[in-house]
């Protein structure tokens, strides 16, 4: 049975709309809560039967939630490798739950998708509830995640310790179990060579950074995922407020870097960014990293008002739909790397032509 993406509210990607604050610099804000169901071995040690019982309990609990009762359950353990990769490309499941390098996912692996949240089941922890917001809105994401977690907690006995807080498989998540992150685009800081200082400053303030797909992903296209590093000893509100304050400063630094580029290297930057746009418009073959870097340049050009008539929403969609699993779905078959490069260039050309009114 093929994965029917039309069943997913907003395609499972409400963040892609570019409707939130500072959407030209911040793609999305996310809050993820790690929880485990008391009475069961944690996922890494759980047997198949336990994982299936956890899945059943979560389904029953979700049915009592006003929001999650309208969600779609996707059994990741029943999907093909390309379908699992597609969910990962949409940020709906982690690399671990998708089992990208394996022939199949572990028994009981699933994700519940609603128009406000995605609930991963039987990943590293029994439950990983994540809420996305478009643009820079960590506090909004936290408020919604907290409300949904309370609804689930009324139905499920969650593993909790009076001294340590919520118990998780990995000690680094013990306490709040909260991971708040903001996906930012920082080409100005990279081009002005200020990015090293900014990233060092993040680490000194207890934050960390990763690539577009979080843990285990490389930084490509000047996209950085900034998140809290610790979850123990501070409240959820404190963690979210701290991240928001620091990211606000990073956004200001990026905006200033763009002003400096426009003032001191105007024609050089303009030429570089228009070349990126021209390559995307007319290239016949595009590698994945190459496309990401060129889209980064065009995104910067739109943010600096050098290119008009091109929306950030369209660029957000291209980041997702130009990836391998989405290209394979559109072509109706698995693609080799060469075939994917050709299909990627064809897809990007078509989208940009349509946006320019030439399709």
Image (cartoon, rainbow, N blue to C red):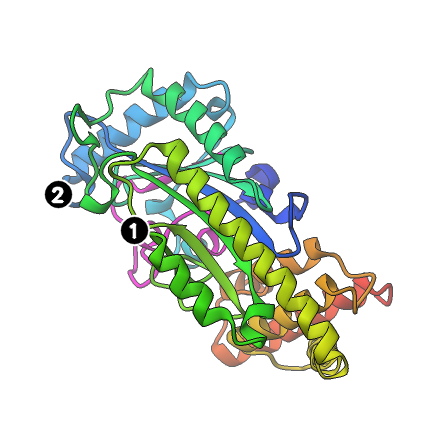
Quarter of the image for residue 252 reads bottom right
Q: Residues within 10 Å of mark 2 (few under 14, many from 20)?
A: few
Query: Which label is found at residue 45?
Result: 2
Does 337 sit above or below residue 252?
below
At a point 64% along the width and 60% down the height, the residue shown is 255
Quadrant including the C terminus? bottom right
In the structure shown, which secondary structural element does the residue marked by tag 1 occupy?
A: loop
Relative side of 130 to 221, left or right: left
* Residue assigned mark 1: 105
Quarter of the image for residue 188 reads bottom right
* Magenta span of residues: 86-113
Does 20 sit above or below residue 193?
above
- CB under 8 Å between discs 2 and 1: no
Give the percent coordinates (x, y) of residue 315.
66, 60
Q: Is residue 94 magenta?
A: yes
At a point 58% along the width and 75% down the height, the residue shown is 192
């Amino acid at each position: 049975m093929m994965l029917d993406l039309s069943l997913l509210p907003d395609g499972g990607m409400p963040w892609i709309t570019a409707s939130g604050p500072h959407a030209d610099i911040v793609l999305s804000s996310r809050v993820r809560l790690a929880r485990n169901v008391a009475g069961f071995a944690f996922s890494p040690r759980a047997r198949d039967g336990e994982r299936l019982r956890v899945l059943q309990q979560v389904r029953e609990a979700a049915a009592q939630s006003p929001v999650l009762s309208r969600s779609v359950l996707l059994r990741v353990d029943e999907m093909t490798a390309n379908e699992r990769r597609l969910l990962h490309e949409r940020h709906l499941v982690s690399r671990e739950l998708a089992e990208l390098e394996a022939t199949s996912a572990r028994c009981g692996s699933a994700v519940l998708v609603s128009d406000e949240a995605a609930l991963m089941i039987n990943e590293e922890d029994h439950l990983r509830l994540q809420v996305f917001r478009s643009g820079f809105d960590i506090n909004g994401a936290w408020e919604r995640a907290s409300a949904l977690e309370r609804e689930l907690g009324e139905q499920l006995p969650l593993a909790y310790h009076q001294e340590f807080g919520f118990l998780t498989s990995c000690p680094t998540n013990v306490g709040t179990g909260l991971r708040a992150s903001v996906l930012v685009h920082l080409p100005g800081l990279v081009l002005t060579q200020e990015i090293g200082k900014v990233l060092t400053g993040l680490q000194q303030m207890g934050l960390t950074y990763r690539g577009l797909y979080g843990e285990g992903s490389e930084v490509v296209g000047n996209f950085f995922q900034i998140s809290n590093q610790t979850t123990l000893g501070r409240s959820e509100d404190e963690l979210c407020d701290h991240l928001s304050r620091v990211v606000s400063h990073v956004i200001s630094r990026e905006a200033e870097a763009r002003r400096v580029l426009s003032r001191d290297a105007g024609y050089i930057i303009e030429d570089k960014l228009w070349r990126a746009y021209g390559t995307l418009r007319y290239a016949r073959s595009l590698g994945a990293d190459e496309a990401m870097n060129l889209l980064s340049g065009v995104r910067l050009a739109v943010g600096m008002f050098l290119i008009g008539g091109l929306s950030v929403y369209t660029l957000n969609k291209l980041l997702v739909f130009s990836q391998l699993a989405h290209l394979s779905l559109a072509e109706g078959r698995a693609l080799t790397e060469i075939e994917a490069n050709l299909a990627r260039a064809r897809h990007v050309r078509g989208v940009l032509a349509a946006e320019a009114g030439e399709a």
